[in-house]
Image (cartoon, helix red, strand yellow):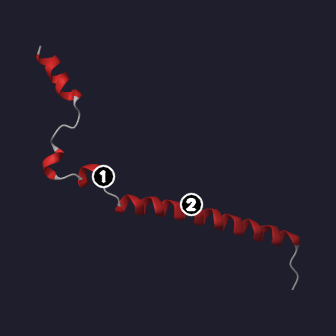
Amino acid sequence: MYLDPGFGGMLVQVVVVLIAVGGAILFSLRKKLSQLFSRSKSETQPIENQFTSTNENEDDAVDVLDD
């Protein structure tokens, strides 16, 4: 069986493309899975702390608006 040099170059290109596409798919899946299993900060806070102010300057801003 005879394989010409053009076939070897094409075979190398196919392997490079498969590696690149596989890496892109793995990167995308990793990002989607990490988003699926991660929680935002508001979900991890207890319910009673979700509506309380943690910013000390927020009270000052309300005082300025009352004047």
The spot of residue 37 in percent (x, y) is 35, 63
Q: Is residue 1 above or below residue 38?
A: below
**At numbered mark 1, what does the secondary structure look like: helix, strand or loop?**
loop
Quadrant assignment for the N terminus? bottom right
**At numbered mark 2, what does the secondary structure look like: helix, strand or loop?**
helix
The spot of residue 16 in percent (x, y) is 70, 65
The structure residue drawn at horizontal position 76% and vertical position 68%, both measured from the top left corner, is 12
Q: Which residue is at the front of the view, 51 or 32?
A: 51
The residue indicated by pointer 1 is 40
Quadrant assignment, res 13: bottom right
The residues bearing labels 1 and 2 have C-alpha atoms spaced at a distance of 26 Å
Quadrant assignment for the C terminus? top left
Horizontally, is 37 left or right of 29 in the view?
A: left
The structure residue drawn at horizontal position 24% and vertical position 54%, both measured from the top left corner, is 43
Q: Nearer the viewer, mark 1 or mark 2?
A: 1
The structure residue drawn at horizontal position 82% and vertical position 71%, both measured from the top left corner, is 8
Horizontally, is 53 left or right of 25 in the view?
A: left
Q: Is residue 55 above or below residue 18?
A: above
Mark found first going from the N terminus, 1 or 2: 2
Quadrant assignment, res 21: bottom right
The structure residue drawn at horizontal position 52% and vertical position 60%, both measured from the top left corner, is 27
Residue at the limit of the structure toward the front, as seen here:
56
Q: Tell me the crowding category of disc 1: few under 14, some 14 to 19, or many 20 or more residues within 10 angstroms, Cα based.
A: few
Q: Any mark on residue 24, and which?
A: 2
Q: Amino acid at mark 2?
A: Ala
Q: Tell me the crowding category of disc 2: few under 14, some 14 to 19, or many 20 or more residues within 10 angstroms, Cα based.
A: few
Q: Which residue is at the front of the view, 21 or 60?
A: 60
